[in-house]
Image: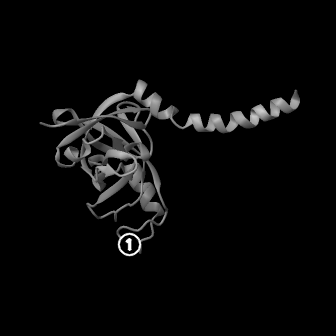
Protein backbone atom coordinates (compact mmCIF):
# COMPACT_ATOMS: atom_id res chain seq x y z
CA UNK A 1 0.00 0.00 0.00
CA UNK A 2 2.88 2.37 0.72
CA UNK A 3 4.30 1.81 -2.77
CA UNK A 4 0.93 2.68 -4.29
CA UNK A 5 0.90 6.00 -2.39
CA UNK A 6 4.39 6.81 -3.67
CA UNK A 7 3.43 6.08 -7.29
CA UNK A 8 0.24 8.09 -6.92
CA UNK A 9 2.19 11.04 -5.52
CA UNK A 10 4.71 10.84 -8.37
CA UNK A 11 1.84 10.99 -10.87
CA UNK A 12 -0.09 13.76 -9.12
CA UNK A 13 2.78 16.26 -8.73
CA UNK A 14 3.50 16.73 -12.48
CA UNK A 15 -0.23 16.82 -13.21
CA UNK A 16 -0.77 19.50 -10.55
CA UNK A 17 2.10 21.60 -11.97
CA UNK A 18 0.70 21.27 -15.49
CA UNK A 19 -2.83 22.19 -14.44
CA UNK A 20 -1.70 25.17 -12.33
CA UNK A 21 -0.45 27.12 -15.39
CA UNK A 22 -3.90 28.33 -16.56
CA UNK A 23 -5.18 29.22 -13.06
CA UNK A 24 -4.08 32.90 -13.03
CA UNK A 25 -5.41 33.67 -16.55
CA UNK A 26 -8.71 31.96 -15.69
CA UNK A 27 -9.04 33.91 -12.44
CA UNK A 28 -8.20 37.11 -14.32
CA UNK A 29 -10.91 36.45 -16.92
CA UNK A 30 -13.45 35.53 -14.24
CA UNK A 31 -12.85 38.32 -11.72
CA UNK A 32 -10.90 40.98 -13.63
CA UNK A 33 -11.95 44.49 -14.49
CA UNK A 34 -12.56 44.99 -18.19
CA UNK A 35 -10.25 47.44 -19.97
CA UNK A 36 -9.99 48.40 -23.63
CA UNK A 37 -6.50 48.74 -25.13
CA UNK A 38 -5.33 50.24 -28.42
CA UNK A 39 -3.33 47.82 -30.53
CA UNK A 40 -1.59 47.28 -33.86
CA UNK A 41 -1.73 43.73 -35.35
CA UNK A 42 0.77 42.03 -37.65
CA UNK A 43 1.69 38.58 -39.04
CA UNK A 44 -1.75 36.93 -38.77
CA UNK A 45 -1.06 33.36 -40.00
CA UNK A 46 0.82 30.38 -38.60
CA UNK A 47 0.96 27.34 -40.87
CA UNK A 48 0.74 24.85 -38.01
CA UNK A 49 -1.50 26.64 -35.51
CA UNK A 50 -3.86 28.59 -37.78
CA UNK A 51 -4.84 32.24 -37.85
CA UNK A 52 -3.86 34.56 -35.07
CA UNK A 53 -3.19 38.22 -34.46
CA UNK A 54 0.26 39.05 -33.10
CA UNK A 55 -0.47 42.19 -31.13
CA UNK A 56 1.53 45.19 -30.03
CA UNK A 57 0.03 47.55 -27.47
CA UNK A 58 0.45 51.23 -26.79
CA UNK A 59 0.98 50.47 -23.09
CA UNK A 60 4.13 48.47 -24.00
CA UNK A 61 5.99 51.64 -25.08
CA UNK A 62 5.62 54.30 -22.42
CA UNK A 63 7.12 57.75 -22.08
CA UNK A 64 9.94 57.98 -19.54
CA UNK A 65 8.13 61.02 -18.12
CA UNK A 66 5.57 58.63 -16.56
CA UNK A 67 8.14 57.03 -14.25
CA UNK A 68 7.31 57.84 -10.63
CA UNK A 69 9.84 59.90 -8.63
CA UNK A 70 10.52 56.95 -6.26
CA UNK A 71 11.28 54.55 -9.10
CA UNK A 72 13.35 57.17 -10.95
CA UNK A 73 15.49 57.74 -7.83
CA UNK A 74 15.93 54.00 -7.34
CA UNK A 75 16.99 53.49 -10.97
CA UNK A 76 19.27 56.54 -11.02
CA UNK A 77 21.09 55.26 -7.93
CA UNK A 78 21.74 51.91 -9.63
CA UNK A 79 22.93 53.52 -12.86
CA UNK A 80 26.53 54.40 -13.70
CA UNK A 81 27.02 57.87 -15.24
CA UNK A 82 28.94 56.33 -18.16
CA UNK A 83 26.09 54.01 -19.16
CA UNK A 84 24.71 54.15 -22.67
CA UNK A 85 21.27 55.67 -23.32
CA UNK A 86 19.66 52.25 -23.82
CA UNK A 87 21.97 50.11 -21.73
CA UNK A 88 20.70 47.56 -19.24
CA UNK A 89 23.19 47.65 -16.37
CA UNK A 90 20.86 46.00 -13.87
CA UNK A 91 18.68 43.75 -16.05
CA UNK A 92 14.92 43.88 -15.85
CA UNK A 93 13.07 45.88 -13.23
CA UNK A 94 9.67 44.84 -11.90
CA UNK A 95 7.22 47.70 -12.37
CA UNK A 96 3.52 48.41 -11.96
CA UNK A 97 1.80 50.41 -14.69
CA UNK A 98 -1.30 52.28 -13.56
CA UNK A 99 -3.93 52.52 -16.28
CA UNK A 100 -6.46 55.30 -16.75
CA UNK A 101 -9.46 55.43 -19.08
CA UNK A 102 -9.18 57.96 -21.87
CA UNK A 103 -10.87 58.83 -25.09
CA UNK A 104 -13.60 56.36 -26.13
CA UNK A 105 -12.95 54.28 -23.00
CA UNK A 106 -9.50 53.17 -24.17
CA UNK A 107 -7.06 52.76 -21.30
CA UNK A 108 -3.55 54.16 -21.41
CA UNK A 109 -0.57 54.22 -19.08
CA UNK A 110 -0.77 56.90 -16.38
CA UNK A 111 2.17 56.08 -14.10
CA UNK A 112 5.03 53.57 -13.91
CA UNK A 113 6.03 52.81 -10.33
CA UNK A 114 7.82 50.22 -8.23
CA UNK A 115 4.70 49.40 -6.16
CA UNK A 116 1.01 49.16 -7.04
CA UNK A 117 -1.19 52.10 -6.15
CA UNK A 118 -3.86 51.27 -3.56
CA UNK A 119 -6.72 52.24 -5.87
CA UNK A 120 -7.24 52.04 -9.60
CA UNK A 121 -6.31 49.56 -12.31
CA UNK A 122 -2.70 48.46 -12.67
CA UNK A 123 -0.73 45.82 -14.57
CA UNK A 124 2.50 44.14 -13.49
CA UNK A 125 5.35 44.15 -15.98
CA UNK A 126 9.09 44.20 -16.44
CA UNK A 127 10.85 47.32 -17.64
CA UNK A 128 13.80 46.31 -19.78
CA UNK A 129 15.40 49.57 -20.81
CA UNK A 130 15.63 52.81 -18.95
CA UNK A 131 16.61 56.01 -20.77
CA UNK A 132 19.08 58.53 -19.47
CA UNK A 133 17.57 60.69 -16.69
CA UNK A 134 17.84 63.89 -18.77
CA UNK A 135 16.04 62.29 -21.72
CA UNK A 136 12.39 62.28 -22.71
CA UNK A 137 12.75 58.83 -24.34
CA UNK A 138 10.44 55.86 -24.31
CA UNK A 139 10.67 52.81 -22.11
CA UNK A 140 9.66 49.29 -23.12
CA UNK A 141 7.58 47.20 -20.72
CA UNK A 142 6.94 43.48 -21.11
CA UNK A 143 3.68 42.14 -19.64
CA UNK A 144 4.37 38.47 -20.28
CA UNK A 145 2.99 35.90 -22.67
CA UNK A 146 -0.69 36.62 -22.07
CA UNK A 147 -0.59 39.58 -24.46
CA UNK A 148 1.43 38.15 -27.33
CA UNK A 149 -1.02 36.21 -29.53
CA UNK A 150 -4.76 36.07 -29.94
CA UNK A 151 -6.03 33.11 -32.00
CA UNK A 152 -9.04 33.71 -34.26
CA UNK A 153 -11.37 31.65 -36.47
CA UNK A 154 -9.80 30.06 -39.54
CA UNK A 155 -9.54 32.39 -42.59
CA UNK A 156 -10.28 35.56 -40.57
CA UNK A 157 -6.69 36.51 -39.69
CA UNK A 158 -5.93 38.30 -42.97
CA UNK A 159 -8.73 40.80 -42.48
CA UNK A 160 -7.34 41.64 -39.03
CA UNK A 161 -4.03 42.63 -40.63
CA UNK A 162 -5.66 45.63 -42.32
CA UNK A 163 -8.28 46.46 -39.68
CA UNK A 164 -8.17 49.08 -36.97
CA UNK A 165 -9.03 47.43 -33.70
CA UNK A 166 -9.10 47.53 -29.95
CA UNK A 167 -8.58 44.66 -27.59
CA UNK A 168 -10.78 44.07 -24.61
CA UNK A 169 -8.81 42.57 -21.77
CA UNK A 170 -9.41 41.88 -18.12
CA UNK A 171 -7.08 43.03 -15.36
CA UNK A 172 -7.03 41.43 -11.92
CA UNK A 173 -4.46 41.86 -9.17
CA UNK A 174 -1.83 43.10 -11.65
CA UNK A 175 -2.39 40.26 -14.13
CA UNK A 176 -3.84 40.84 -17.59
CA UNK A 177 -5.59 38.43 -19.96
CA UNK A 178 -7.00 39.09 -23.45
CA UNK A 179 -10.74 38.60 -23.72
CA UNK A 180 -11.73 39.61 -27.26
CA UNK A 181 -10.85 41.78 -30.25
CA UNK A 182 -13.15 44.61 -31.27
CA UNK A 183 -12.75 45.76 -34.88
CA UNK A 184 -13.50 49.44 -35.59
CA UNK A 185 -15.88 49.97 -38.44
The residue closer to the viewer here, 91 or 48, is: 48
Q: Tell me, yes or no, if residue 74 can be seen here.
A: yes
Residue that appears at 45% across and 70% down: 80
Left or right of 181? Residue 20 is right
Dot 1 crowding, Cα within 10 Å, few <14, some 14–19, many 20+: few
Outermost bottom residue: 82
What scheme was used to colour the molecule? one colour
Left or right of 58? Residue 96 is right
Circle 1 residue: 84
Q: Quadrant of the N terminus?
A: top right
**Percent x, y of residue 8:** 76, 31
Q: Tell me, yes or no, if residue 144 can be seen here.
A: no
Residue that appears at 41% across and 72% down: 83
The residue closer to the viewer here, 181 or 89, is: 181
The quadrant holding residue 9 is top right
Outermost top residue: 31
The quadrant holding residue 107 is top left
The residue closer to the viewer here, 132 or 152, is: 152
> Is 27 situated above or below 116?
above
**Percent x, y of residue 72:** 39, 55
Residue that appears at 19% across and 44% down: 159
Outermost left residue: 185
Q: Quadrant of the C terminus?
A: top left
**Numbered disc total:** 1
Q: Secondary structure at mark 1?
A: loop
The quadrant holding residue 50 is top left
Left or right of 166? Residue 84 is right
Residue that appears at 48% across and 61% down: 91
**Percent x, y of residue 120:** 35, 31
**Percent x, y of residue 145:** 43, 46
The residue closer to the viewer here, 160 or 171, is: 160
Amino acid sequence: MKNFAKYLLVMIIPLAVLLSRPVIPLLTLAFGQEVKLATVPFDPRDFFRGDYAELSFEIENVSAALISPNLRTKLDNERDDNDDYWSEPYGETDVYVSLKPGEAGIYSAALVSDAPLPDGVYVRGKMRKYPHPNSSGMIRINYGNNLSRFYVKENTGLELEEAEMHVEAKVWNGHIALDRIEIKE
